Amino acid sequence: MDTIQKELLEAVSGLHEIPVGAYNIRTNGKTEARNSTEHIEILPRESGDGIIIKIKPGTKNESVHIPVVLSQAGLKETVYNDFYIGDDCDVTIIAGCGIHCGTDDGSQHDGIHSFFIGKNSRVKYVEKHYGTGDGKGQRIMNPETIIEVGENSYMEMDTAQIKGVDSTIRKTTAKLADHASIKVMERLMTHGIQKAESRFIVDMNGEDSGANIISRSVARDDSYQLFQSVLNGNAKCSGHTECDAIIVGNAKISSIPEITANNSDAALIHEAAIGKIAGEQIIKLMTLGLTEEEAEEQIISGFLK
């Protein structure tokens, strides 16, 4: 891997070198390195581009790294990754995509990840998107996540897109069985004329299932963001969706929370707040010696943590 690829890899996955355990590292449309372990098997798909990850029942305290790096100009790909997580597991999956663009030719990565989670399991999924380069070509990422959470299982998603992605449509759909739950924490920042759409649809089909969808976003300059969250309570369940957003400059943000109770024991809440940084916050930090610009950056940084 060259210097640019290594920098992208570190940014999206925190890796400085080949990790211990199971991993699949993809660079410029091909597999750079792959390793399976006793409990986690990674296989190429028989048709289409992508991999199949099989995690054996009872696997505990293990992780899988599956980062993608694009540094070649004009590359466009669609990758399908399927995860089969057995019963009684506790695992962490670290994904992410980094794109470097130094020319007028854009690059695009569309990643479709499907999760099939067994019973009594816990899965943490971390996904970061990041773009670099001073080329005029667009850096485009369109992740789609399809999730089925089994009985008494829990999935946590931590997603972040903080810099350099010109266009993205992020889709997440989830179906929850009895006593299953999902928590999503999305952090997003756009600038320039970037566009970002985030769409969540969660069907709480199981008794005592639950969902908590949280988005924190900052839109700067002339960028645009759309957040849509749909919670369907189809059984006795609890659901919460929340969008907090900060506007800086001439940006535009649209938040569309939607909750539907199809069962009398469904308890659903939606919240949305969009606005600029309060002047008193800026003034308070400036009295501590920060410039107005530094104060603004400090507030945004804390908000997105």
Image (spheres, grey):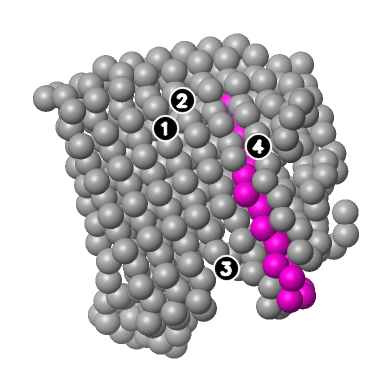
Q: Residue at x 67, y 20 (%)?
A: 54
Q: Which residues are magenta?
A: 91-111
Mark 1–mark 2 Cα distance, whole angstroms, equals 6 Å
Secondary structure under tag 4 reads: strand
The residue tagged 4 is 80
Q: Residues within 10 Å of mark 1 (few under 14, many from 20)?
A: many
Residue 303, by quadrant, is: bottom left
Secondary structure under tag 1 reads: strand
Mark 1–mark 4 Cα distance, whole angstroms, equals 17 Å
Q: Nearer the viewer, mark 2 or mark 4?
A: 4
The residue tagged 2 is 148
The kind of residue tagged 2 is Glu
Q: Residues within 10 Å of mark 3 (few under 14, many from 20)?
A: many
Residue 85, by quadrant, is: top right
Q: Residue at x 39, y 82 (%)?
A: 249
Is 274 drawn above or below residue 284 in the view shown? above
The residue tagged 3 is 166
Which mark is first along the chain, 4 or 1? 4
Mark 2–mark 3 Cα distance, whole angstroms, equals 30 Å
